[in-house]
Image (cartoon, rainbow, N blue to C red):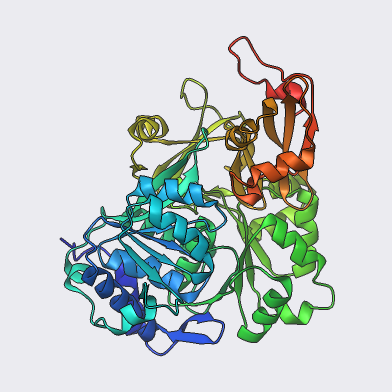
Amino acid sequence: MHKHNELLVTDIPRRNMYLFPEKTAIIFKRRRLTHREFYERTNRLANGLINLGIKKGDRCAILSMNNSEYLECFYGIPKAGGIFVPLNYRLAANELIDILNDSGASILIYEGRFDDVIDKIRLKTKIHEFVSLDASTDKVIRYEQLLSQSSEIEHEISRNHLCSNDGFCLMYTSGTTGFPKGVLLTQRNMIANIWGVQVAYRCTHMDRHIAVMPLYHGGSLQYSAVHYSVGGSVVILEQFDAEEFFRTVKKEKVTTAFLVASLLQKLAEGLKGRENDIESLRLIFYGASGIPKEHLKKALNAFKCQFTQGYGMTELGPRGVTYFTPEDHEEAMKDPAKEKRLSSCGIVTPSVEIRIADESDETLPLGETGEICVRGEPVFQYYWNNKKETERALKGGWFHSGDLGYLDEDGFLYIVDRKKDMIVSGGENIYSTEVENAILLHPCVHECAVFGVPDKEWGESVHARVCLKPGASISGEEIVKFCKKHIASYKKPKSVEFVDSIPRNQMGKVIKKMMGT
């Protein structure tokens, strides 16, 4: 039962409807929705899904590029008691099929541009209802038709039969073996993260946020939800385009933006002569991957607005573990003694506690490097269908991130390295094992090793060292092309080199430190 002394994420559209009924909530292309209209559309969606047979705890997935319907699904699916499952549209069909089967999703909402992928999904999943956002055929349920045939009155389920422990969102993040892990986040996790980020970054109902990163990305989705939740406006771009970014910021008087490091650099480089277009920007959130200190300093000087960033991941809500404030940036730029802080990700937010642990899970003193461990309301509940990984990650009541870092004497967190062989390229997490498995499918390949190498534009890029079978001959370009058939294009190697052997230890594990990584 809904506990009347707790505010749920699904209560926020109703709250905003009462507080800001005629204020613009969502802007996407020519569509502009007020908070009242958005509230009513999320109700229609929830009622429509209930009419399709969704039950409390059922999973409903979405495969789409950025649009206003994405945020309607974020709020509307849980209003029906369902669990929202955002899908990375850059994944290959077989990868999406694996995720859908693991999640047990029964309904899929999708864009028509993915029809070819949907045809494959139909044959290999147990999804029984397909809802198209833009189909012109009568063969599928149309999203707008589903809404128009459903009531705008909020359902009894949403008002009185949900609680903070209910599943809200199931987001998939790659595991070290390459198979995606489903991270279950509850209403409590999400609301704690929303308010934690709001307090840390001082977002208000006066803000206009621009969503340019894919909304399947935890950071992009969370920052959009934070701004909507405080009664602000969210301006959505279908995908990133520098010219469209500048034009929209100027036209809509955008005040905040979330950008991964590579795009921040690209915009800073193209800003000359466009300074007047971004006069309304007060704050840029950046993150999802590391940024060289010199590149950050150039961006700070170019934009001349405030900057902030923080540390987080899908399992942590997914944002708001630490925050590096605008004042911290300003101090670090002015005081040479504090310049090093530009390499940190700030101090812990009010909603969590962090510690640094050694290999025995004992807490390390300040300044010593170990695994970053987190506990607090935003921490996820469990990995879907993966009890073993859940127990490992949450041992002792702390989430063990797999990231290595340290805290300085002032409480600033620094990320040093990753325990897992994860490559972060343009804000996307890429696991070396997954790429290695794809390369090893080629009949000419004997063994291989994949790791990240520094990349000025993307932070890191995927590099592969390949050992061929005796007598075999193949080019690096053919390896890259082959990978695209088995994994998402963005995961393929950017560079390939051929070697006579791969160094391994006595246990047969590749010794990557011998490769100059």
Toward the viewer: 454 or 374? 454
Image spot of residue 102 (x, y percent): 37, 45
Q: Is residue 353 left or right of residue 498?
A: left
Q: Is residue 439 above or below residue 485?
A: above
Toward the viewer: 129 or 71? 129
Quarter in which the C terminus is drawn? top right
Note whether residue 223 is visible.
no
Residue drawn at x 50%, y 85% is 31
Toward the viewer: 280 or 347? 280
Q: Is residue 111 left or right of residue 454?
A: left
Toward the viewer: 487 or 137? 137
Image spot of residue 272 (x, y percent): 84, 73
Q: Is residue 170 above or below residue 387?
A: below
Q: Residue furthest right?
A: 273
Residue drawn at x 44%, y 85% is 33
Q: Is residue 198 above or below residue 473?
A: below
Image spot of residue 152 (x, y percent): 27, 83
Q: Quadrant of residue 434?
A: top right
Q: Is residue 236 left or right of residue 157?
A: right
Q: Residue furthest bottom?
A: 22
Image spot of residue 439 (x, y percent): 65, 34
Residue drawn at x 50%, y 54% is 319
Quarter in which the N terminus is drawn? bottom left
Residue drawn at x 77%, y 27% is 516
**Count of residue discs:** 0
Q: Quadrant of residue 159?
A: bottom left
Note whether residue 401 is visible.
yes
Q: Is residue 511 above or below residue 429?
A: above
